[in-house]
Image (cartoon, rainbow, N blue to C red):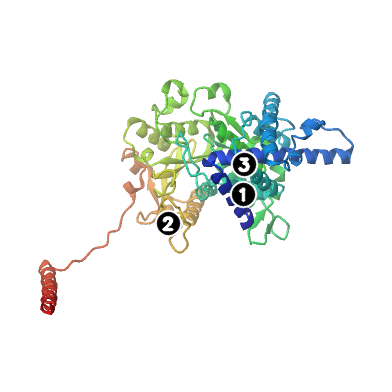
Amino acid sequence: MLTGQVRNDIDKLWEKFWTGGITNPLTVIEQISYLMFARMLDMQEDVAERKASRTGNDFSRLFPNNPEAQLLRWKNFKNLSGKELHSHLKQNVFPFFATLGKKSDANDGLGDDGSAIEALGHIGEYMQDADLEIKNESVLVSAIALVDDLPLTQSDVKGDIYEYLLSKLTTAGINGQFRTPRHIIDAMIQMIDPQPTESVCDPSCGTAGFLARTMEYLNVTYSSSEAEGGRWKDEEGNWHYTGDKLEPYREHINTEMFWGFDFDTTMLRVSSMNMALHGVNGANILYQDSLSKSIKEHFPQQEEDFFDVILANPPFKGAIDETNTNPDVLGVVKTKKTELLFVAHILRSLKLGGRAAVIVPDGVLFGSSKAHQQLRQNLIENNQLEGIVSLPSGVFKPYAGVSTAILIFTKGGSTERVWFYDLQADGYSLDDKRTELKGEDSNDLPDAIANWKQYRELVESNASSEDIGNVFGDKTQKAFVVDAKDIASNKFDLSINRYKDVVYEEEEYEDPEVILGKLKALENDIMADLNELEGML
């Protein structure tokens, strides 16, 4: 968690960018990312130099040992004057990012697998077209000063810093992509419960929110007690977690666990930085349209039966060209709609027994087209559709007001019953402001997670349908189960309103003659007052 001071510093910098003429939030984040990258390169070189001086061994330098190259280091250019600084960054430092990126691209990284230098190399691959867009020299000097003050040496804080920056993204991308709220991501991760031995993928990773929060979840879950030094509280009462119990899995986490695909290079830059700042040095953040047929050529292994866990909020805007779509995905569901194709792709790329939590628009649940019904039938008959969490329509404001749901499913087998949860409040107002709410009934997410865990315990202990029905059979409650046969008989309709029983309270009204009598008496009172007023004139 961030201290109030760091938040205030970032807010001030954001205001500086805004008043300096850079009003696109993604551009602001991109520019700050470049500066953070420059500082992280210098920090890494410092670490390597200290190690070399202790051991007496030579090391492979990022910055050649000559005056011109050494001026590319953060510590050597951060105190330049505004005009000189702007010229130096634009003409020397940013072009250096491009050469570093090309070198990393050619050598598949700049260091050993899972090392910090490898992570910086992979980020560099997406920095090749980096350009300085800060024209105002005072804004640039302020940005350099703030980035220099950020506690980037504290591994558990630097990820929070970047997440706080990303929280300021308030516009949807041209392909319908937008930032998934952190509390929704966290709830999905808790329900899926990824393990440090598994592989986790987001096929439309955007800023890598799902992957970065999964790393945070593992840090919290695999930290020793406070007494053992695995967690501690700062002066503002925020908990920090070391993830010390993850050490046996660290190589797997750094190189094989996390996979993110996207075809927006800006997003790849941001997501690479996000993962590195969350302590994952070799995350596989890759340029690829997950629905394109080119995935079979570029990533044939990952395209089918590969991942243990998939967490996603794929873009659901418009349709795509069938001629460029992976034919095997079209074999699962013949459609142009991206929201259906993504679910089909996720089913293909999961291992048998692999788990997924995916956000879909409500249309996927009740659409009447052949493709909609075909996909839902596949989920029910050829896989285990475990649960559906219906989300309130304001969850994705201010980006979009579309109604959505979370699909939770396991690849393979068949569905016996589906667990539903009617989430009516997520802890924030459902308007464009999304103000945090306190008090009773303001947040159903903890209850949804608790109910889900209770349901999974029953299923995993092989409880009978009768026992499960005793707990989740009441369809007037927020959490309930529906038999798969009932769903099949309703054209595989998965909308919660189809199965939820609504309790109507009987309203009692007075006899019409009584109401008319009251209206007449009221009219008489009005006329009496008017007559009295007229007498005063």
Residue 160 marker: 1
Vertical arrangement, residue 395 with respect to residue 110, above or below: below
Q: Residue at x 60, y 53 (%)?
A: 7
Q: Picture quarter containing residue 522?
A: bottom left
Q: Nearer the viewer, mark 3 or mark 2?
A: 3
Could you tell me if the residues under marks 3 and 2 are in contact, i.e. CB atoms within 8 Å? Answer: no
Q: Residue at x 87, y 39 (%)?
A: 53
Q: Nearer the viewer, residue 64 or 311?
A: 64
Name the quadrant of the C terminus: bottom left
Q: Nearer the viewer, residue 332 or 482?
A: 332
Q: Picture quarter containing residue 515?
A: bottom left
Residue 384 drawn at (x, y percent): 46, 40
Q: Picture quarter containing residue 34?
A: top right
Amino acid type, mark 3 = Ile
Could you tell me if the residues under marks 1 and 3 are in contact, i.e. CB atoms within 8 Å? Answer: no
Residue 170 drawn at (x, y percent): 48, 44
Amino acid type, mark 1 = Asp
Whether residue 67 sits left or right of residue 416 in the image: it is: right
Instruction: Label 2, secondary structure: give it.
Output: helix
Q: How much space separates mark 1 and mark 2, taking CA atoms?
A: 39 Å
- Residue marked by disc 2: 471
Residue 32 marker: 3
Near mark 1 (Cα within 10 A), the count class, few <14, some 14-19 or many ≥20, is some
